[in-house]
Amino acid sequence: MTQSSAPAPTRFSDEEVDRYARQLVLSELGGPGQQALKRARVLIVGLGGVGAPAALYLAAAGVGTLGLIDHDAVALSNLQRQIIFTTADAERPKVEAGAAHLAALNPHVAVEPFVERLTPDNARSIIERFDVVLDGTDDFETRFAVNAACVANGVPLVSGALGRWNGQVGVFTGQPCYQCLVPETPPDAETCARVGVVGALAGVIGAMAALEAIKLITGAGEPLTGRLTLYDGLAGTSRVVRVAADPACPVCGSAQA
């Protein structure tokens, strides 16, 4: 998503000008970029290790509307990395607890909670209402459904994943799509519950995913479109690789064009 050539002007209160002062002085963002953020609608799929910190940073940045979709409730084991929640939130639906904390962080942000699982049946109708989707889920059935709906609706997808000490962030805008990168569910697919994850890694990957969404919305810099950043937390290193388009991809391949 980039800024339109003649966007409708957006008025900021004095409080908002003060709140976003450190962004407004950025030459790559400034007033037009901040206005684009306020007009933007971002859907966060999965309020977990990636989605929780990403939601905090996007709300703080002034994204006008944040959609939160997650069917799960807060567990004590989440709190080590899902920093949007507190101990008092245990057993509350994640999106309800998250919406309350985001409203407290920035009352200028509208939050749309969806207490449900995103599936192939509802993905397209939900995603078509948003400008950018940020997916931080850890099951591939949901990831594939999100990707297919984003491609069908022409909505940019920011994808983040993590486990153990490693994480990755990529951006997909049509072709190649996420399923070009992961054609099918890996037989040895891992989850944080099974293999573990260091909590601070979630902050790193979630913040990187939020940054990519902000770049897509404002047109600042060069998003990771068709590329993947691989981060090694133990070594403190990262590298960027290109994602090749798969002509036989069932979602974005030539047969689907």
Image: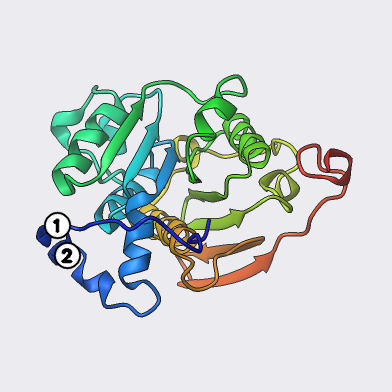
Outermost residue on the left side: it is 15
Q: Nearer the viewer, residue 178 or 232?
A: 178
Q: Secondary structure at mark 1?
A: loop
Q: Position of residue 221 (x, y in %)?
A: 50, 73
Tell me, yes or no, whether the two marked residues, 2 and 1, touch with CB atoms within 8 Å. yes
Q: Is residue 125 above or below residue 65?
A: above
Q: Amino acid at mark 1?
A: Ser
Q: Is residue 166 above or below residue 72?
A: below
Quadrant of res 236: bottom left
Which residue is labeled 2 in the image? 17
Residue occupying image coordinates x 26% and y 27%: 96
Q: Amino acid at mark 2?
A: Val
Q: Is residue 32 above or below residue 186?
A: below
Quadrant of res 242: bottom right
Q: Residues within 10 Å of mark 2 (few under 14, many from 20)?
A: some
**Image side of residue 186 versus residue 166, left or right:** right
Residue occupying image coordinates x 51% and y 56%: 167
Which residue is labeled 1 in the image? 13
Q: Nearer the viewer, residue 35 or 90?
A: 35
Residue occupying image coordinates x 29% and y 23%: 93
Q: Secondary structure at mark 2?
A: helix
